[in-house]
Amino acid sequence: TIRMVTSGHFNSKLTEYAGPLVYFVGDTIPDLTLEISYDLGGPLVITGATITVSVSRLKGTTAIKTGTATLTDTNNGIARFSWGSFTFNSPGTYVGQAKIVMADSSVLSTQKFLIEVLNRVAGL
């Protein structure tokens, strides 16, 4: 689960990274639960929204994984992002972010979240 915030107003939380999540190279990655709230508190109601998640290497310019999250609890701002068959194939630091297109077509972005991908211990 990654808890992240969104806002139409500047708040220091938006400039901070959420996470990091930690995975290992080649592991099957469990679905990612997104809990989205306002930076001033309270969940973002996401009824009728479309949430797109994108991940790239930190300071990278190309997305390595992009997809649409499934809304699971719209009144509490909760969605689930499935990695599918994707696995990280090299260690490093990655960054992700979600873009929310609300039912009225307004667009909100969440704060970014970090992912640390590590090598396994030799022999595993």
Image (cartoon, rainbow, N blue to C red):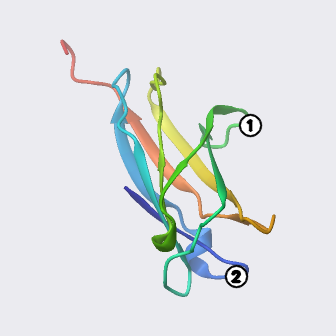
Q: Nearer the viewer, residue 122 or 88?
A: 88
Check the image and name the residue furthest to the top.
Answer: 123
* Residue at x-position 46% and y-position 72%: 76
Name the disc covering residue 61, or none.
1
Q: Left or right of 96: which side holds 31?
A: left
Q: Nearer the viewer, residue 9 or 105?
A: 105
Residue matched to label 2:
10
Disc nearer the start of the sequence (2/1):
2
Residue 80: give x, y in percent of width and height: 46, 49
Q: Are marks 2 and 1 in contact (CB under 8 Å)?
A: no
Crowding at mark 2 (Cα within 10 Å: few <14, some 14-19, many 20+): few
Judged left or right of residue 10, residue 84 is left
Q: Quadrant of residue 2?
A: bottom left
Task: Kindly identify the residue that appears in the image at 38 percent across and 48 percent down.
Answer: 21
| Badge count | 2
Residue depicted at x 72% and y 83%: 9
Element at label 1: loop
Q: Is residue 65 left or right of residue 80?
A: right
Up-down relation of residue 75 to residue 81 (above or below): below
Name the outermost residue toward the left. Answer: 123
CA separation, marks 2 and 1? 25 Å
- Circle 1: residue type: Thr
